[in-house]
């Protein structure tokens, strides 16, 4: 696409760097990591060295000092090759680190952000619970103030980096009966569950972070896609969290996490566009070389129409994603645009990956080609960080704002 409206020289430099890294170091291992569900520690170390785990954070906090658009370019470009590596960048930065940057005290930022931005440790975000998914306001985890600490009890579900991470921001009810206004957020620390591998890779663990007794990860999820991304339950059993680890004002946890999800939705849109583009790339390459009836299938009009529709959708989705990122970067309201970008791009990624499998025919249903992995990876985009149904509700509320109660 002609992206001069959005991207400058620095963004193209990020794209070129991530493209080379994804091609040379991620693509050769992506299928094997997907099959084994092994977390890619060696590549995570390299991502930290390249600055990919702290792209939008200021250099004073150990970040790369770039902007939101550069961050989205990196997520998209990585997802063209592998979504598991892409979600590691996206979830760690947006969900695990941005709440501390945006809502934390100076002391909290200085303590945790440099570790996260450098990739020395990985971060996560605890909102979803067994009984509170789309209804995030139904949080059941509790935090009771006892002297100079809060005592947390409960659990979180489907947490990216739940096992491998060491720094987490989580929500808990501090004022029962107050609804969403009674939910607060906290910074918690634990030891990575993959300590030997983290030490061998030289990243993922920092001995200066004291693990909080009673805070632990549960079993690892056996997922359809994003299989090289670590997803687990988080469990809190009488966890004493110092009062200085309250993140933002008491009672503001839900509102602040909803703001975090708005920005996270742009990241999911970028990942989804990357997946769609990667699937289209694979389909075009295959169609140009696969021969049937004595000619390349790229010469068939039915293939033309399929690929042309996908290319058009990807251009439209990329504009939606860039526009939402531009609004966020310049301090404008962007919740509606983020929901639109996430909805359109995630559903597009599902269509694009299914179409790419179809173009490959029987080969697309095997693991000989990456399109079957891309199809599996695409599905969670329609579920995570707000389902497609939730996005439609968000968009509709903006349409009727001030006119009707919905």
Image (spheres, grey):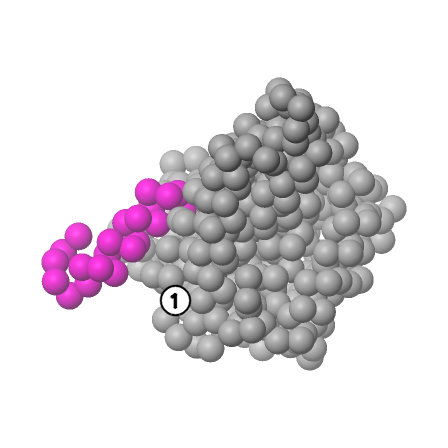
In this rendering, is residue 45 above or below 162? below
> Residue 172: x percent and y percent?
43, 51
Observer-nearest of 161 and 378: 378
Could you tell me which secondary element the residue under label 1 belongs to? loop
Confirm whether the magenta stretch covers residue 304: no
**Classed neighbour count for the residue bearing mark 1: other residues with Cα under 10 Å, few (<14), some (14–19), many (≥20):** many
> Residue 26: x percent and y percent?
76, 46
Q: Is residue 29 left or right of residue 101?
A: right
User: Could one spot residue 379 in this view of the protein?
Assistant: no
Observer-nearest of 32 and 154: 32
> Residue 41: x percent and y percent?
78, 46
Magenta part of the chain: 386-406
Residue drawn at x 71%, y 69% as measured from the top left = 13
Q: Is residue 349 left or right of residue 391?
A: right
Confirm whether the magenta stretch covers residue 398: yes
Residue drawn at x 64%, y 48% as measured from the top left = 80
Q: Is residue 290 left or right of residue 41?
A: left
User: Could one spot residue 33 in this view of the protein?
Assistant: yes
Residue drawn at x 76%, y 32% as measured from the top left = 32
């Amino acid at each position: 696409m002609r992206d001069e409206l959005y991207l400058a020289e620095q963004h193209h430099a990020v794209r070129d760097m991530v493209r080379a890294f994804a091609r040379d170091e991620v693509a050769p291992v992506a299928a094997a990591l997907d099959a084994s569900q092994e977390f890619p520690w060696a590549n995570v170390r390299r991502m930290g060295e390249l600055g990919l785990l702290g792209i939008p954070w200021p250099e004073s906090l150990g970040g790369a000092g770039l902007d939101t658009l550069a961050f989205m370019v990196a997520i998209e470009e990585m997802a063209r090759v592998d979504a598991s590596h892409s979600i590691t960048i996206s979830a760690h930065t947006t969900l695990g680190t941005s709440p501390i940057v945006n809502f934390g005290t100076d002391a909290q930022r200085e303590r945790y952000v440099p570790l996260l931005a450098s990739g020395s440790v990985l971060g996560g975000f605890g909102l979803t619970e067994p009984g509170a998914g789309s209804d995030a306001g139904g949080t059941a985890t509790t935090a009771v103030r006892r002297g100079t600490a809060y005592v947390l009890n409960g659990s979180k579900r489907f947490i990216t980096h739940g096992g491998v991470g060491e720094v987490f921001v989580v929500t808990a009810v501090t004022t029962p009966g107050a609804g969403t206004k009674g939910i607060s957020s906290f910074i918690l620390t634990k030891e990575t569950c993959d300590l030997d591998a983290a030490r061998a890779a030289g990243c993922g663990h920092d001995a200066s972070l004291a693990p909080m007794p009673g805070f632990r990860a549960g079993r690892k999820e056996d997922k359809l896609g994003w299989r090289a991304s670590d997803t687990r339950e988080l469990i809190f059993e009488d966890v004493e969290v110092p009062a200085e680890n309250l993140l933002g004002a008491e009672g503001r946890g839900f509102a602040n996490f909803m703001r975090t999800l708005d920005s996270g939705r742009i990241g999911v849109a970028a990942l989804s566009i990357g997946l769609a583009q990667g699937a289209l790339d694979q389909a075009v390459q295959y169609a140009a070389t696969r021969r049937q009836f004595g000619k390349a299938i790229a010469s068939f009009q039915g293939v033309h129409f399929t690929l042309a529709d996908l290319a058009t959708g990807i251009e439209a989705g990329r504009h939606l994603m860039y526009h939402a990122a531009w609004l966020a970067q310049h301090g404008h309201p962007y919740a509606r645009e983020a929901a639109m970008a996430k909805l359109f791009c995630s559903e597009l990624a599902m269509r694009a990956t299914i179409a790419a499998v179809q173009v490959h025919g029987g080969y697309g249903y095997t693991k000989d080609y990456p399109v079957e992995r891309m199809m599996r990876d695409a599905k969670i985009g329609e579920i995570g960080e707000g389902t497609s149904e939730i996005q439609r509700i968000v968009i509709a509320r903006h349409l009727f704002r001030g006119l009707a109660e919905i």
